[in-house]
Image (spheres, rainbow, N blue to C red):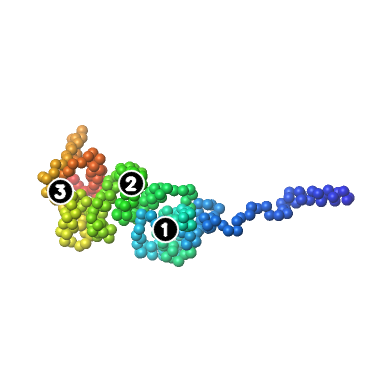
């Protein structure tokens, strides 16, 4: 009997373990002071909830202005229905915070709504400055959130960072090259006309037409002749005024004219009152094609 009892004592620990009992907790011990990067993160590491003070806007975000009315409207929606979509953030050791990649308006609205936390999608891995800017630019373009000059400056920054031409930028972000051309042309305008574009007094497409003129005096002259209400200089009127002024200058400079004949009898003529190259000609044809498609969509009859 004693022999049996001794044997049971010797194997007791093994019996207990086989039945699920432990003499001590074998779970891994967590650090009593968590890393700031991991506060708020869940088992699913790509998503989590952060205290709003642990998140900050990107100081290099291409979009610099946010409508108070839009932020208030979104804040009211968040109060009523909660945050439906997480913002996208990346960790910054320099700031010791999460920096917003996309969703700054949602961040502002959440803050304005008085919430203390915000739902986030965490970016794993390092992103280059070019990748961050490209992602921010594409998201803003898709949502049409960027103002014309913000867009033009972001295009310029991407081109400088990558050494891209306008055509290479268009291919990288999947937009029509003519959009890049029109956007960059706005930066060639004088500051007073740029301010009109930025404030909405002058439409970006009408401003692009003005950029085709050789001097700022000519551009200002067209704006000063517009006796209608502010901001109503239409694309059609701007185009007509520019064509008239370019016609006056035609005799002063030798231009370019190319005609392309189609097999079905159609002819396409591209001309300019100055010297140019085939790349510029390509941009002009793409712009003309956009105009043709726009007229088709609006059922404009050919006269």
**Count of marks placed on residues:** 3
Task: Please give the name of the residue rendered at 24% of the width and 57% of the height, measured from the top-left corner.
Answer: 191
Question: Which of the two residues, 300 or 254, is positioned nearer the viewer here?
Answer: 254
Query: Viewer-nearest of labels 3 and 2?
Result: 2
Question: Seen in the image, is 153 located left or right of residue 82?
Answer: left
Q: Residues within 10 Å of mark 1 (few under 14, many from 20)?
A: some
Question: Seen in the image, is 219 located left or right of residue 184?
Answer: left
Mark 3 to mark 2 CA distance (whole Å): 30 Å
The extreme bottom residue here reads 114
Which numbered disc covers residue 159? 2
| Label 2 secondary element | helix
Mark 1 or 2, nearer chain start? 1
Residue receiving disc 1: 57
Answer whether residue 221 is visible to the viewer in this image: yes
Task: Please give the name of the residue rendered at 16% of the width and 44% of the height, measured from the top-left corner.
Answer: 273
Across and down, in percent, residue 59 comes to 39, 57
Mark 1 to mark 2 CA distance (whole Å): 23 Å
Find residue 253 and report its image quarter.
Answer: top left
| Label 3 secondary element | helix
Residue receiving disc 3: 246
Mark 3 or 1, nearer chain start? 1
Task: Please give the name of the residue rendered at 89% of the width and 50% of the height, measured from the top-left corner.
Answer: 1
């Amino acid at each position: 009997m004693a022999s049996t009892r001794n044997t049971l004592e010797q194997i007791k620990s093994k019996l207990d373990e086989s039945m699920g009992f432990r003499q001590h907790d074998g779970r891994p011990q967590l650090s009593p002071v968590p890393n700031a990067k991991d506060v708020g993160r869940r088992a699913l590491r790509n998503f989590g909830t952060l205290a709003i003070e642990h998140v900050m806007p990107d100081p290099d975000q291409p979009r610099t202005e946010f409508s108070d009315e839009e932020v208030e409207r979104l804040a009211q929606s968040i109060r009523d229905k909660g945050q439906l979509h997480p913002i996208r953030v990346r960790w910054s050791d320099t700031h010791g915070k999460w920096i917003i990649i996309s969703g700054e308006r949602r961040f502002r609205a959440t803050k304005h709504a008085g919430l203390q936390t915000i739902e986030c999608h965490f970016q794993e891995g390092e992103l280059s400055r070019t990748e961050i800017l490209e992602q921010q630019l594409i998201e803003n373009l898709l949502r049409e959130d960027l103002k014309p000059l913000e867009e033009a400056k972001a295009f310029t920054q991407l081109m400088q960072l990558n050494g891209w031409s306008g055509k290479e930028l268009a291919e990288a972000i999947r937009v029509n090259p003519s959009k890049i051309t029109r956007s960059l042309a706005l930066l060639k305008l004088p500051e007073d006309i740029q301010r009109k574009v930025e404030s909405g007094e002058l439409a970006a497409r009408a401003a692009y037409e003005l950029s085709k003129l050789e001097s700022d005096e000519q551009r200002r002259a067209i704006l000063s002749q517009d006796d209608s209400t502010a901001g109503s200089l239409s694309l059609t009127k701007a185009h007509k005024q520019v064509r008239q002024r370019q016609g006056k200058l035609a005799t002063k400079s030798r231009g370019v004219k190319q005609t392309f004949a189609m097999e079905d009898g159609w002819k396409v003529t591209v001309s300019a009152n100055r010297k140019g190259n085939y790349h510029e000609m390509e941009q002009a044809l793409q712009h003309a094609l956009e105009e043709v498609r726009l007229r088709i969509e609006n059922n404009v009859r050919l006269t």
